[in-house]
Amino acid sequence: METYRIKRPSTPRVPILVSVPHCGTAFPDEIKNEYDQELMNAPDDTDWFVDRLYSFAPHLGITMITAVLSRWVIDLNRDPGSKPLYTDGRIITALCPATTFLGQPLYKDGRKEVDPAEVKRRTELYFEPYHEKIKQLLEEMKSEFGKVLLWDCHSIRQVVPTIQKEKFPDLILGSADGKAADQDLIDVALKSLGSANYSLQHNHPFKGGYITRHYGKPSAKQHALQLEMSKINYMDNGQTQYYPARADKMVELLYKALNDVAETLIVPKD
């Protein structure tokens, strides 16, 4: 089945790839009956509507890749070798999760983990195609422009007590502690994101997942940044429905941030 969608630029291309790895809600036919059907019908760990927030990106010349499958099938932002992203005691769901962020079992049989052979199968079928496409798109843009930025897009409930007890900031820019992008790009992104009335943190409590850490190679002119946001910024108070009055303000800020970063990136051809 289709595992990702590509939206090509509708104006001259700029060297930015927007990735939305957690917006998918589909479950493959061969495994969907194994899941708790009530949870599956409304997968709460989804980064709801994030692809919609960034739908303006092609009009800025930006290419988009968005996930089709739910992160409960396979998490495209986890290390395929299951290397943990953090070691501070927070809950970290697996490459193929067996529980929600709150520890609820995803499967009818209550399994604690997904069988390794099944993880391998899903990795080959669903994880690798997404990442092969990212790699191809980044190489194309770097060849054309000399440098490229991957902007990885996420959202999360305002409070997830298994990660931290306090409310999350409105916006969290992750740069893998400054290792995934040049400082000038980080500075431009922080200045743009900080220009509106939202709380903003850098690398805390999220510094970027596998995508940011894996693809961010500033020495090779390949940069990566992750933007996490609290869902309350664009959804209703229950964080279940799209809320246009809030979303429109967030879209305005995202547009500014990506436009500012694009202007920093664009270089003349040799």
Image (spheres, rainbow, N blue to C red):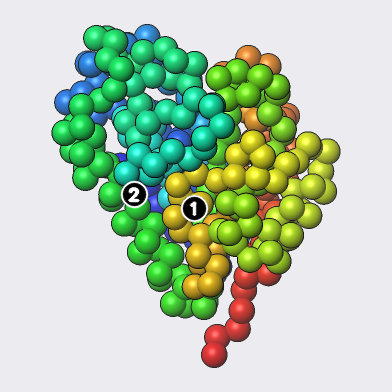
* Residue 69 relative to residue 270: left or right: left
Question: In which image quadrant can residue 90 be found?
Answer: top right
Q: Nearer the viewer, residue 88 or 119?
A: 88
Q: Is residue 18 visible?
A: no
Question: In which image quadrant can residue 16 be found?
Answer: bottom right
Q: Nearer the viewer, residue 7 or 268?
A: 268
| Mark 2 residue element | helix
| Residue farthest along the bottom direction in this orientation | 270
Establish if 207 lies above or below 157. Answer: below
Disc 2, disc 1: CB below 8 Å? no
Establish if 230 lies above or below 137. Answer: above
| Mark 1 residue element | helix
Dot label at residue 130? 2
Q: Is residue 150 visible?
A: yes
Dot label at residue 213? 1
Gap in angstroms between the C-alphas marked 2 and 1 = 16 Å
Q: Residues within 10 Å of mark 1 (few under 14, many from 20)?
A: many
User: Where does the image place residue 207, in percent across and percent down from the top left?
Assistant: 59, 45
Dot label at residue 16? none
